[in-house]
């Protein structure tokens, strides 16, 4: 019997996959993931958790740099109040 499963992903691979998913989402939708849409909630929660880790100083230098790119793109697509 052969094993047809792919090798397990490392924590860095999983982190990179989440990062890339949100980068692709923002490029396609020109907005940040919403906490009000069920299909986007996992991305929103991941974003919030990474911000907490960043503020606590717990992100590695590589992740800090890449998350900074995500924050910069998020700042470009920040929601603007239509009534102001």
Image: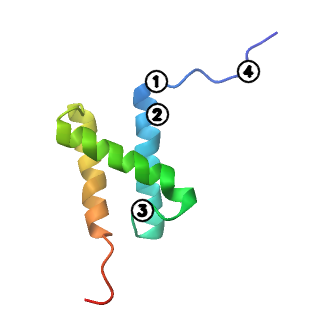
Q: Residue furthest right?
A: 1
Count neighbours of disc 3 (C-alpha within 10 A) and say few if under 14, some if 14 to 19, many if 20 or more. Answer: some
Give the residue at x 31% y 43%.
50
Mark 1–mark 4 contact, CB under 8 Å? no
Q: How many discs mark residues in the rendered view? A: 4
In the picture as drawn, the residue positioned furthest to the top comes out as 1
Is the Cβ of the residue at disc 1 closer than 8 Å to that at disc 2?
yes
**57 on left or right of 83:** left
Answer with mark 3 or mark 4, whichever residue precedes in sequence: 4
- Residue carrying label 2: 14
Q: Please report whichever mark, 4 or 2, sits nearer to the chain's N-terminal start.
A: 4
Mark 1 → mark 4, Cα distance in angstroms: 18 Å
**What whole-number distance in Å separates the C-alpha atoms at marks 1 and 2?**
6 Å
Is 59 positioned to the left or the right of 2 in the image? left
Which of the two labelled residues, at mark 3 and mark 1, occupies the earlier sequence position?
A: 1
Q: Residue at x 26, y 43 (%)?
A: 52
How far separated are the C-alphas under marks 3 and 4?
A: 33 Å
- The residue under label 1 is 10
Q: Mark 1 vs mark 4: which is more N-terminal?
A: 4
Q: Mark 3 or mark 4, which is nearer to you? A: 3
Residue ID for mark 3 = 26
Residue drawn at the location 51% of the way across and 25% of the way down = 9
Determine which quarter of the picture holds residue 83. bottom left
Which picture quadrant has residue 34? bottom left
């Amino acid at each position: 019997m052969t094993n047809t499963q792919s090798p397990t992903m490392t924590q860095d691979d999983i982190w990179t996959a989440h990062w890339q998913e949100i980068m692709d989402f923002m490029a396609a939708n020109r907005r940040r993931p919403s906490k009000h849409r069920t299909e986007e909630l996992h991305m929103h929660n991941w974003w919030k958790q990474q911000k907490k880790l960043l503020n606590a100083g717990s992100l590695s230098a590589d992740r800090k740099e890449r998350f900074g790119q995500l924050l910069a793109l998020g700042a470009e697509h920040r929601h603007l109040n239509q009534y102001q």
